Image: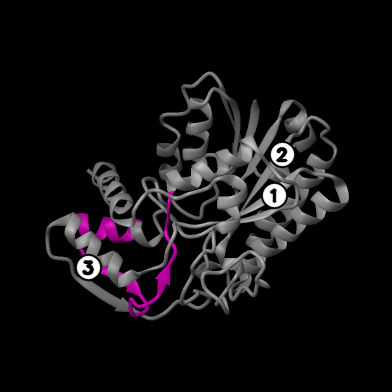
Amino acid sequence: MNILVTGCAGFIGSHLTERLLKEGHSVVGLDSFTPYYDRRYKETNLVGIKGNRAFKLIESELSAIDLRTVLTDIDFVYHLSAQPGVRASWGNEFQIYIRHNIDATQLLLEAAANCQRLLGLVYASSSSIYGDAETRPTSEQLVPRPISPYGVSKLAAEHLVRLYSVKRGVPAIALRYFTVYGPRQRPDMAFHRFCRAAISDQPIELFGDGTQTRDFTYIDDLIAANLACLREGWAGEIFNIGGGGAVALSDVIEHLRAIHRHPLTVTFQGGVLGDAQHTSADIRFAQARLGYSPVVLLRDGLAEEYRWARLFYA
């Protein structure tokens, strides 16, 4: 297949692009290299991809190119590009989230509605749309109540995906990712920061008191879920993609201590406005329909990210 991956140079996008190329697909990668974090991280993510003849990189925002032309020869789309981050989404910065998360998604869907060749479109949503969920594990049937502007922007785009699926016939689905980690994780994300601090013998800054829990999803498991959509695909469906259980951040630190084999110093910072206290994915629907089953244990996945970080910062 000819596949478009938006956000191809990011953490998840680069892993997905690599895997698709390995599976024998041709990939058009689109990334605008927004200045949310240092461009050099994304350039490094692409090192093993750029030399592949089946890969073409387009450096642009979605709003700056003719998407109907881009989609002319595309069979499938993975829409991963977005402005990330809960903390940065408040105040005037929200305009950036509107542009990259909502407006850009609508433009892509509008172009997809006029593409007869398109077999499917997967939108990368987020567990942030749930906010402080009333029930855990949280199923896709729970009414979303985001508690951050970032979560609002992801939910708005998700509604657009369903709308274009129902009313315009776009064969689109949404995957709600729960806290993805692993090699190449964004530098602002917790595990990356923890590993970097440990390697450089600096204190680990932990937001909150460590009792907050997350359903951590290893990157390889997440990529498997995305590939399952390529083989199947159900227009209008929404799937939770989680790691199989919630873990407290204090327990993550203990796992890292065992991996690092040296003392770690932890400093506790204030909580972050808009961060949920707990997340936990009910993945039964994805298991039944996609055959999704996470296999990587947290301690093993964290060890892989730690090894990657040691090499990256060597």
Residue that carries the numbered disc 1 in the rendered image:
173
Q: Which circle's residue, 3 or 2, is located before the other in the chain?
A: 2
Q: Position of residue 170 (x, y in %)?
A: 80, 44
- Judge whether residue 19 is colored magenta: no
Give, as a three-letter code, the residue at label 1: Ile
Q: Quadrant of residue 65?
A: top right
- Segment tinted magenta in the rendering: 192-218
Q: Residue at x 49, y 70 (%)?
A: 279
| Alpha carbon distance from label 3 to label 1 | 41 Å
- The answer, for residue 43, to whether it is visible in the render is yes
Which label belongs to residue 243? Answer: none
Q: Given the image, on which type of amino acid does mark 3 rest?
A: Pro
- The residue that label 2 is drawn on is 120
Residue nearest the viewer, comparing 274 with 279:
279
The answer to whether the residue labelled 3 contacts the one labelled 1, judged by CB atoms less than 8 Å apart, is no
Q: Residue at x 52, y 34 (%)?
A: 17
Kindly indicate whether the residue at mark 1 contacts the one at mark 2 (C-beta within 8 angstroms): yes
Q: CA distance from mark 2 to mark 1?
A: 8 Å
Colour scheme in use: one colour
Can the viewer see residue 150? no
Q: Are marks 3 and 2 in contact (CB under 8 Å)?
A: no
Of the numbered discs 2 and 1, the one sitting upstream in the chain is 2
Residue at mark 3 = 203
